[in-house]
Amino acid sequence: MSLRTSRPARAGQYLALLCYLVFLAFPFLWLISTAFKPAPELGSLHPTWIPDSPTLENFRQAFDEQPLLRAAGNSLTVALSAALIAVVIATPMAYVMARQRSRLATAATGWVVVSQAFPFVLVIIPLFLVLKNLHLINSLFGLIMVYVVWSLPFALWMLVGYVRAVPAELEEAAAVDGAGRLRTLVSVTAPLLAPGFVATAMFAFITAWNEFFFALVLLKSPEKQTLPVILTHFLGAEGVADLGPLAAAAFLATIPSLAIFAIIQRRITGGMLAGAVKT
């Protein structure tokens, strides 16, 4: 009886998952379709999923109209730097919060969660003034620091969970052998946190790669603007979008995030499985 009741429930779960995947995939698939449509099909009153006459003209126009490669280089520099710095800073903090069970650590964890609820608009004015006093306006380094601070709370929260999953007995054994806290963290705990490092870095990278508001406010020089800001240049003065090139550029902008997620997801799974069979 239980087997019969579980099958419909499982089928319902799979159906709900399929509907959710379709919901997520629809915008991306429509973006790809639009990127390869010629101009007459873009203005058609009866749009189709598959272009009747696929073309690469939208991609050529996108590169001709805007400096996509330079903007992508800026985004890559900012996103990679922010991800690496966030992981380096968050690791020792997460170790202390996970191993030192106290009211202060609990309060710090609560503050980490609450800080994620702050809207961008609430902090942009004081943030702008601080960066102006530090002469970091219109600077990629200043934008990197903003992304590090913004992603650090969630990165810290993620790594705390990974550190708590590491058996404390391993660290106690290292302490018996004479290893200090720093040596234990570097030699014993850190290698076991590789999947956590990858997941946290991926989160920080994607957050910085896709972020638009801070980059729009803090970067003024065209040669320093990131890819999300450059995409807005495909909008005309009256808000009319150059739809074909915009779709092509937006499609290209999503490829690095998808590629990194696909590569890193395998490593995360592989690292977790390798840790599960170690003796």
Image: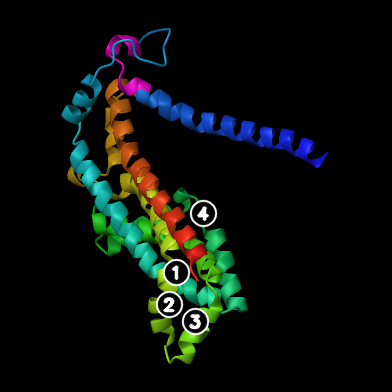
Residue identified by numbered label 3: 171
Whether pointer 1 and pointer 2 mark residues with C-beta atoms closer than 8 Å, the reply is yes
* Image x and y of residue 163, in percent: 51, 70
Labels 3 and 2: the sequence-earlier one: 3
Q: Nearer the viewer, residue 148 or 34?
A: 34
Residue identified by numbered label 2: 188
Q: Nearer the viewer, residue 206 or 213?
A: 206
Main SS of the magenta segment?
A: helix
Whether pointer 3 and pointer 2 mark residues with C-beta atoms closer than 8 Å, the reply is yes
| The residue positioned farthest toward the right in the image shown | 1
* Image x and y of residue 173, in percent: 50, 85
Q: Mark 2: which secondary structure?
A: helix
Is residue 206 visible from the viewing direction of this image? yes
Q: CA distance from mark 1 to mark 2?
A: 7 Å
Q: Mark 3: which secondary structure?
A: helix
Residue identified by numbered label 4: 118
